[in-house]
Amino acid sequence: MKNMSFTHLYGNLKNALSGLKETYQTQCSFRTEICLGFPLFLTALLMPINALDKVLLIFPIFFVWACELINTAVETTVDRISKDWNPLSKRAKDISSALVFIALIQAVFIWAFILWHIFANA
């Protein structure tokens, strides 16, 4: 296994933060998901619920963000190859968009289920 130096780890962190910054600056969907997800994240942290419920509420938020980053990476790669319309390019973009859509549905379902469970048993 390759020895991971602090310099190497710092470089990885710098690249990751650069990717987050670039995505935030260029992708309206990512900004929207951050603006909606961050208050939900704080709400989950501050709710008087058990740790497992907190994790179950927080995980889908980060999952949506991760899926949006994947979607952006796919779209950027496809655009890098060619800006010309191509059915395979469209398919790749549509599939990565579907990933985000499914993640959003999953997040809404989990939040609704857990909140219903909390308030129904209150």
Image (cartoon, helix red, strand yellow):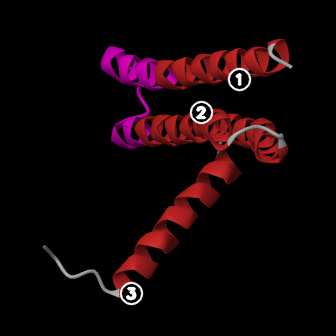
Q: Most prominent secondary structure in the magenta stretch?
A: helix
Q: Could you tell me which quadrant the C terminus lies in?
A: top right
Q: Nearer the viewer, residue 18 or 44?
A: 44
Residue pictured at 80% horizontal, 16% vertical: 121
Q: Residue furthest left?
A: 1
- Above or below: residue 39 compared with residue 57: below
Q: Is residue 2 part of the magenta span, yes or no? A: no
Q: Please report whichever mark, 1 or 3, sits nearer to the chain's N-terminal start.
A: 3
Q: Position of residue 90 (x, y in %)?
A: 41, 18
The amino acid sitting under disc 2 is Pro
Q: Are the residues flagged by discs 1 and 2 in contact, CB closer than 8 Å? A: yes
Q: Is residue 86 part of the magenta span, yes or no? A: yes
Q: Nearer the viewer, residue 22 or 122?
A: 122
108 displayed left or right of 40: left
Q: Which residue is mark 3?
A: 6
Q: Which residue is mark 2?
A: 60
What's drawn in magenta, residue-wise?
77-97
The amino acid sitting under disc 3 is Phe
Residue pictured at 61% horizontal, 38% vertical: 52
- Residue 111, label in figure: 1
Q: Please report whichever mark, 3 or 2, sits nearer to the chain's N-terminal start.
A: 3
Q: Are the residues flagged by discs 1 and 3 in contact, CB closer than 8 Å? A: no
99 displayed left or right of 34: left
Q: Nearer the viewer, residue 3 or 97?
A: 3
- What secondary structure is found at the residue carrying circle 1? helix
Residue pictured at 35% horizontal, 81% vertical: 8
Q: Position of residue 46 (x, y in %)?
A: 83, 47
